Image: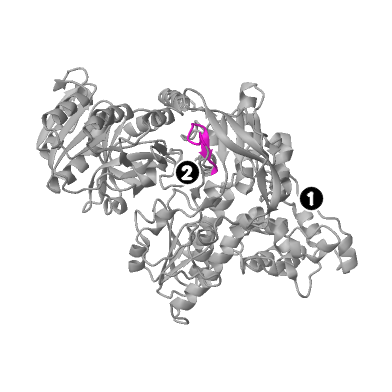
Amino acid sequence: MAPLAAKERMKIASQDMPVQEADVRAGNFDEVALGFTLELARMEAERCLQCARPQCVDGCPVGVQIPEFIKALRDGDMVAAVQAMKAKNNLPAICGRVCPQEVQCESRCLVGLKNQPVAIGRLERFVGDFELRSRSCPPTRGASTGKKVAVVGSGPSGLTCAVDLARLGHSVTIFESLQNPGGVLVYGIPEFRLPKAVINAEIEFAAGCLEIDIRTDYVIGRTLTIGELLQEYDAVFMGTGAGLPSFMRIPGINFNGVLSANEFLTRVNLMKGYQFPQYDTPVKIGRKVAVVGAGNVAMDAARCSLRLQTQHARLNGQQPGEVHVVYRRSRDEVPARLEEVHHAEEEGIIFDFLTNPIEIFGDERGNVRGMRCIRQQLGEPDASGRRSPVPIPGSEFDMDVDTVIMALGTSPNPLVFVDAEGLQRTRHGTVVADQDSGRTTMPKVWAGGDVVTGAATVISAMGAGKRAAADIDHFLQGDSAW
Amino acid sequence: MYRILEKQDLSEAVKLFVAEAPQVARKARAGQFVIVRNDDHGERIPLTIADYNREAGTITLVVQEVGKSTMQMGKLKASDSFATIAGPLGHPTEIENYGTVICVGGGVGIAPVFPIARALKEAGNTVISIIGARNRSLLFWEERMRSVSDELVVCTDDGSYGRKALVTEPLKELLEARPGRINRIWAIGPAIMMKFVAQTTRPYNVPTIVSLNTVMIDGTGMCGGCRVVLQDGAQFVCVDGPEFDGHKVDWNSLMSRLAFYRDEERQAVEHWQHVCNLEQVPGGEVA
């Protein structure tokens, strides 16, 4: 294609990414979004204006060289596109799928002022998927510095930190408590949004090329402690996430069938409960499921429930059940990505806004048989800046449900803080760490990701892992004292 | 992978494994547990550590075959491996010199009560142990328990060995015979046994510690599936336990939670036996 003028580029229509149809995907756990073809990707890439001062890069928590990779892509030089991408982001196939681009890079795109912004996330995924197949650009380990770093947790922040440090020549060991590396990417995010094969391929490739030692089944705080790691390693990075679930303090919360989104998603994703009994871990398929909360985790739990119901119903020739998302605020305050809400609604999930559970009922066997809710209205803005929900007196009503999944947010798991003398935490249980460097109040211990911020996004955790890696490197090279 | 160095059949349904897990053995203390997976399709099963050898880097697990995963485990032999052994998890038993203590082990619960009795004995306690099982074939470790106990009572439900009694009977007699002189009691076994032990000791006001084995996934506080209802709210067995004050446990809630996946457990066993049978047929296809 001949070079185009900006005006012409603005006229190119935004390219849709092929997706599985809603009624088909409701019955499987395969990926919903199928990815661009080369033609679609190059057409979309033509829409980029190659701004002299690209705003999109400022919108990216890890500063991906967006115009460079898009330019290479539209020039047909995929290897150069991968190189431009991997200069800042080692896990593009993951980020391209789960980043909230609409509030990051894409929200700053100038094309977006008049038109749909350039689909940077979809292009990133295209480049990432190309690299998963072609392996054109293996990361290389720098000359050994002789320094050893322990990275606790193999989720987005830990992985990013480990990869950056290994590229700089440090010897890195990752400690993971579960049986597979990936953290929330494997236990939390479902297969249909982020296939396990993509995560495993990204991790295996990076860890293999960079000689990163990944030790699974190590529960830091129990198997080893932070204090013990410090005796053996020159620096410790904590990327342990926010794994502790919250339960509402309402009567009936301990009936069978009330479970945390963490438990439900771990059963389904990490343990592959949707393939029970081929896999050993069972997961209950509720006939009527209420998911409480409306963040991304709630969307994941609701959509997993719906898939289990549909699979089960098709197998047995029954009618599928119902999945409700119960949220105390209104649609405008929903914290989940718009795309997730949209997909959920397409698949048939019912949203009950301005509704708050106040009691769960059980039967004689202790199993959930219903949930009492109260309608809410929006009042004055609260501490979060959102209008706070206020119960409407006398508006109580009962929902017929047999499963209640609590998706109310998570906080850091305190287990990891055993024997971490001097490590300060906030009253929310998060680690106090410098935002730029990731340094905690405990010497030679850095932290980043959800363990510092509370539950946030994959990419912000990656950004924190990256910043910490840079500071750890400065420290280990003797460029900065503790 | 965690290699199995030794396997023993303690009874038809109770199997002992000594497995390599040096990072667990290094830290393990009485009362703690590990999460074990058989293979890549396996579920995460919490098993109390029955013994450990720090020098050899091994831990001992005693498993009763009750469902698919434990039956499959029962087929493993020395030189096979577990896919996962993670731990040691949970809080260790609070070992002190309490004076005179009673350790009650029921069925497969005899195994985890052993290291507790041993540690209590080493701490200077007078240790009275009561071990029991449904019948003689389910009893094991009598001599091991005797070696760490000042007194040992052995009973079976059906009288096929030792005294014909439930463990609560000799327990009540001891409490009656030595009023105020029993300082603490541990009980590990089936939930129903621990419930009745707690009921038995309550009128005597003797602190009674039970070790709970609930449904768990991660074992590190992430899922909350293991929560147990206590007098003052729910706690997580994996990180707050596994030992709790038996007088505070809501046993009915505990038992209903244990039964929640019964249908799936049955389905898993049926599926597994079906696959096993097919594998034994020459040329048989695995469904």
- The residue at the point 60 percent across, 32 percent down is A372
- Where does the image place residue B125, in percent across and percent down from the top left? 13, 44
Taking depth in this image into account, of A395 and A80 the one nearest to the observer is A395
Within 10 Å of disc 1 (Cα), the crowding (few <14, some 14-19, many 20+) is few
**Residue B9 in sight in this render:** no
**Residue A442 in sight in this render:** yes
Q: Secondary structure at mark 2?
A: loop
Query: Is residue B259 depicted above or below B229 in this figure?
Result: above
Within 10 Å of disc 2 (Cα), the crowding (few <14, some 14-19, many 20+) is many
Taking depth in this image into account, of A348 and A171 the one nearest to the observer is A348
Q: Residue under circle 1?
A: A16
Query: Is residue B204 depicted above or below A266 in this figure?
Result: above
From the viewer's perspective, is the residue at label 2 or at label 1 nearer?
A: 2
Q: Residue under circle 2?
A: B223
In which quarter of the view is residue A53 placed?
Answer: bottom right
- The colour scheme applied to this rendered structure is one colour
Q: Amino acid at mark 1?
A: Asp
- Where does the image place residue A192, in percent across and percent down from the top left? 63, 43
Taking depth in this image into account, of A145 and A407 the one nearest to the observer is A407
